[in-house]
Amino acid sequence: MREEASDAPGAWRLTLHQNPNGYRFALDAFLLADFVPSETTGPIIDLGTGCGIVAFLLARRFPGSPIVALELQAGLAAVAQRNVAHNALAQQVSIVQGDIRDAAACFASASFGTVVCNPPYRAVGHGRLNPQSEKAIARHEVAVTLCQVVQAARHLLARRGRLLLVYHPSRLAELCSRLEAADLNPRRLRFVHPNGEATATMVLVEALRGGRDALEVLPPLVVYQAPNVYSAEMQAIFQGRALAEGR
């Protein structure tokens, strides 16, 4: 498989190899990594890691926390493993090729303090299914459903452990319903808008296992302040705001 390298901007100090014809990370990886609160406890697991981008961003933020990066697709898991070596993260990040649906068989119950996931947003039958398998699995629920992601997180999280997700607002009601049914109480929400006039295209969600904290809806995050010009906050996220602020 041919690969090409991309450097994460700013203070992240990462170089990531990716398949140029397969699924490639985007800004939602940076949004998810930035949304994880500083008081997060380890160990951390990233469900559906792809090339490893979210796991590596979190390794930079939380250098003392062991991180497991779970990936179903053998090709992507191999790329993620090469990225571990290339970024000298073998002492902190472990790549595991496996299925989110088999989380209960692969990991002990309540073995993680934090679960992060950028799950496929679209149910099968909604939108065009990409003919490229890496992209199809990442974007549509052909390999794992929302319900299965939530159940895996419920099994993996210790009490008061955190689940952090980036998802599509059109399915927020379904997401919250499934979270609450699994005793994962939504605690923080933040909507992400392409610009100040557009409707939200993403939502960041934090849920606590066994928590009963009041839900906090944070101010919206705007990606572009003008066409092709990132907002000040988005630029700060790309530059490693959470690293600089120690949060």
Image: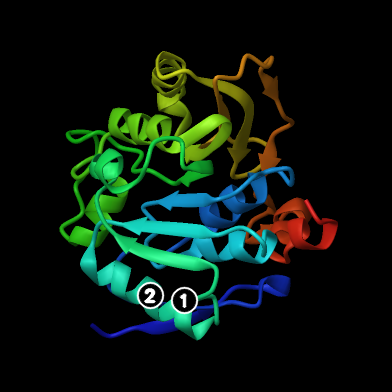
Name the spot of residue 236 as percent of width and height, x first.
Answer: 76, 59
In depth, the one of 170 and 111 nearer the eye is 111
- Asked if residue 52 lies left or right of residue 221, the reply is left
Name the spot of residue 209 as percent of width and height, x first.
Answer: 53, 25
- Asked if residue 8 lies left or right of residue 124, the reply is right
For the residues bearing labels 1 and 2, Cβ distance under 8 angstroms? yes
Name the spot of residue 104 as percent of width and height, x first.
Answer: 29, 38
In depth, the one of 68 and 55 nearer the eye is 68
Mark 1 closeness class: few <14, some 14–19, many ≥20 residues within 10 Å? many
Residue that appears at 76% across and 62% down = 243
Q: Which residue is mark 2?
A: 81
Residue that appears at 50% across and 45% down = 116
Of all residues, the one furthest to the right in this rendering is 245
Mark 2 closeness class: few <14, some 14–19, many ≥20 residues within 10 Å? many
User: Where, quadrant-wise, is the N terminus in this rendering?
Assistant: bottom left
SS class, disc 2 = helix
Q: Quadrant of residue 127?
A: top left
Total labels: the figure holds 2
Rendered position, 138 above or below 185: below
Tell me the amino acid under the disc marked 1. Answer: Val
Q: Which residue is mark 1?
A: 84
In depth, the one of 6 and 66 nearer the eye is 66
User: Residue 182: which numbered mark, if any?
Assistant: none
- Asked if residue 215 lies left or right of residue 219, the reply is left
Rendered position, 228 above or below 188: below
Rendered position, 133 above or below 13: above
Of all residues, the one furthest to the front in this rendering is 108
